[in-house]
Amino acid sequence: MNIAIIGGGNLGKSIAQGLLANNFNASTITITRNRIERLADLKDQGIKVSNNNLEATANAAVVIIAVKPYKIAEILQEIDENISDDKIIVSVVSDFTIAEIENNLTNQPAVVRAMPNTASAVTESITCLASNGNTSDEDITVVANIFNSLGETIQINESLMDAATVLGACGIAYVLRFIRGMIQGGIEIGFDAQTATKIATQTVKGASELLLQKGNHPEAEIDKVTTPKGCTIAGLNEMEHQGFSSALIKGIKTSYDSISK
Ligand SMILES: NC(=O)C1=CN([C@@H]2O[C@H](COP(=O)(O)OP(=O)(O)OC[C@H]3O[C@@H](n4cnc5c(N)ncnc54)[C@H](OP(=O)(O)O)[C@@H]3O)[C@@H](O)[C@H]2O)C=CC1
Ligand SMILES: O=C(O)[C@@H]1CCC=N1
């Protein structure tokens, strides 16, 4: 099965890197962008790189569109002649609906919206998938198999796609900013940057694994750390006095309001 990725930027490249890490046959993947010299690392690993979207999509069973939202309509019109009913269009573009995709195409291929994140590159993405009645279970399985190889997938109603964009895709940036703050604090209390980074990143990974593997509520695991009158609760309460959870919730809502109409 040939896969074309249209738009080899931050996310498109992450998807290609994840597919390679999962032993997808590199020669079945084509990725496009204008500045193809920026895809040299993927080319070196056997992926076809191109700046010609028509050539890239001609023999592709699955076309993944990963361009900026303001470009997707023009890309769909450009590749329209290659998009027969038997192809599957996957859009990772935020804020562009399945109906809008269909309106820019002549034929009626299966259309799936996918919202992965840049952890696709290390096969740790969470990808939310949404489709409508025109897409068969078989087509959804094909798309789910691709994104399962980049991490985990869940299927959602398209009405939740903006929320998925914020919590899952933007979420990577929120967590990284949290880690940066941990590192900055760690340096202030005595660690060099490298050691603080190692401690902070592994601690975040460990906290995630505690929830993923045990299925507990975060507060149940926090209770195990907070010794009465101890240093954890002292710091946690100060963070809450400074608006820690509130700032996060307000930031998530602001991101959501910026895309959701
Ligand atoms: N980044 C993220 O974490 C996430 C992004 N998304 C969505 O993914 C999409 C891409 O985002 P992101 O990867 O960050 O953006 P980038 O700007 O990094 O990537 C977009 C790419 O599209 C390429 N491009 C522009 N015009 C064309 C064209 N005519 N044909 C082929 N390729 C073209 C650009 O190439 P060149 O620079 O050479 O012109 C660029 O590499 C967006 O719609 C975004 O909403 C969704 C989830 C997460
Ligand atoms: O910030 C953005 O608009 C895109 C969508 C999700 C992640 N990056």
Image: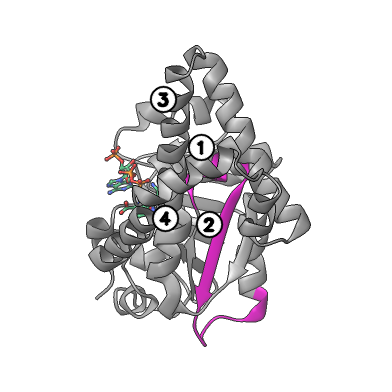
Q: CA distance from mark 2 to mark 1?
A: 12 Å
Alpha-carbon neighbours of circle 2 within 10 Å: few (<14), some, or many (≥20)? many
Q: CA distance from mark 3 to mark 4?
A: 19 Å
Asked if marks 3 and 1 touch (Cβ < 8 Å), the reply is no
Q: Which residue is mark 1?
A: 48
Asked if marks 4 and 1 touch (Cβ < 8 Å), the reply is no
Q: Secondary structure at mark 4?
A: helix
**Amino acid type, callout 4:** Ser
Asked if marks 2 and 4 touch (Cβ < 8 Å), the reply is no
**Amino acid type, callout 1:** Lys
Whether 169 is drawn above or below 100: the answer is above
Q: Which residue is mark 2?
A: 60
Q: Which residue is mark 4?
A: 245
> Farthest bottom residue?
133
User: Which numbered circle lies on residue 184?
Assistant: 3
- Please report whichever mark, 2 or 4, sits nearer to the chain's N-terminal start: 2
Between 122 and 245, the residue placed more toward the observer is 245
Counting from the top left corner in percent of width and height, residue 226 is at: 64, 45
